[in-house]
Image (spheres, rainbow, N blue to C red):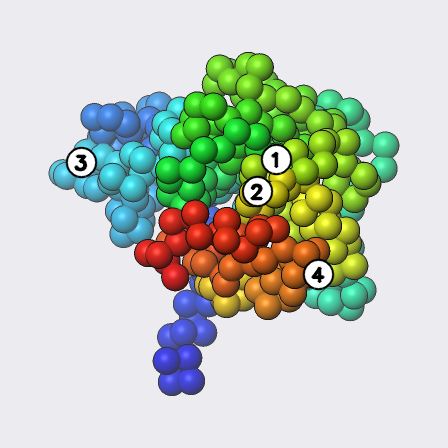
Amino acid sequence: MRAEAGPQYLEDLATGYWFSEALFVAVELEVFTLLEPQGLTTAELAGALAMPVPGLGRFLQALCALGLVLGKGDSYFNTQLASTYLVRGTRGYQGDSILWRKALMSGWQDFSKCLKAGGRVNFPAEGEDPSEFALRIRNYINAMDNVAKTKVREILPFFAGLDLRKMLDVGTGSGAIAAGFLEQFPSLSATLLDIHEVLIYTRELLDKRGFGKRVCYSPTNILEPWTVAKEGFDLVVLSNIIHVYSEEELPLILDQAANCLNSEGILVIHDFFPEHFPEKAALLDLNMFINTYNGRIFPQAWVREQLTKSKLYPTELIPLETDTAVIFAAKDETKLLNLRLETRT
């Protein structure tokens, strides 16, 4: 199909930012939150937003064309998609994640400079105020929390029927992946590993969810020795972690993860792969080139090879319904048979 694509395909690529900008502004203005649950007229929404009616009416028509809003006469209502994912305070809310994507745009505007320099050119300001740094971390964690809450619901069915007791969540961020497992497995306790500045906020989020003493926190730089029990975990999770590091750094990380598994334990690698949603994986790889020190997307064959070098038995790549995929690995190959893989393999 790409080989036969013509000018319209190029036009769609060139105007892709029109779509994202419309979404960004709608989320920033909390249009969908204001429309929930009974809808508003254009004049009512204009009053709530303190803006003129004519331009807002045209904006609402665009949101209708994008499938986010429904118009009936002069009244507008959320579609099911918007009600589920774009209303602040709902379980599936994705607004923080969407606005984090907007924050990445400034880096992309210097993409050509990155290519000429051979890597990232924009870095956090030296001597950044601690409060600004904390706010930046919280914004990032909130964004990743939106995503992780949806991803963990795709991962959990693979573990149906297992008796999980101890879990290690490496690079936990908001703790949403661990929280999903804690809800599903009442006998499970979780150790969350991340840098100290992240775990301060992680603890706040998980305390609000009532997990209390079922969670312990291990402030750690992933590239340094992990201060957690070797062979102490039934489950070790690296969710959206490997694409942040280089091919020189990852073998150390995977070795440490393997050392944390007990004899029956399962390692979960959840990430983006070029073999699944190749366009998204390729563009995320460029995003890592622009916005990180050495992150990149790795092909599944390379990841599986590194897991084997860490003396683990990996599965093939297992795609999720969304844009990411998983690889499971274990010290004992027979333990992989306990996973519910049949519907995906």
Residue at point 59%, 18% (across, down): 204
> What is the spatial separation of the Cα atoms under label 3 and label 1, in whole angstroms?
58 Å
User: Is 119 placed above or below 59 here?
Assistant: below
Q: Is residue 294 left or right of residue 43?
A: right
Res 154 visible = no
> What is the spatial separation of the Cα atoms under label 1 and label 2, in whole angstroms?
6 Å
The dot on residue 309 is 4
The dot on residue 233 is 1
Q: Is residue 196 left or right of residue 317?
A: right
Residue at point 76%, 36% (across, down): 226
> What is the spatial separation of the Cα atoms under label 4 and label 3, in whole angstroms?
63 Å
Residue at point 59%, 68% (across, down): 301
Q: Residue type at mark 3?
A: Asp
Instruction: Name the residue beneath numbered marker 3.
Output: 74
> Which sits earlier in the primary sequence, circle 4 or circle 3?
3
Q: Is residue 72 left or right of residue 159?
A: left
**Secondary element at image label 1:** strand
> Which sits earlier in the primary sequence, circle 1 or circle 2?
1
> What is the spatial separation of the Cα atoms under label 4 and label 1, in whole angstroms?
20 Å
**Secondary element at image label 3:** loop
Q: Residue type at mark 4?
A: Lys
Q: Residues within 10 Å of mark 3 (few under 14, many from 20)?
A: few
Residue at point 51%, 59% (across, down): 315
> Which sits earlier in the primary sequence, circle 4 or circle 1?
1
The image quadrant of residue 141 is top right
The residue nearer to you, when weighing 307 against 323, is: 307
The residue nearer to you, when weighing 330 against 293, is: 330
Q: Mark 4 or mark 3, which is nearer to you? A: 4
Residue at the farthest bottom position: 4
The dot on residue 265 is 2
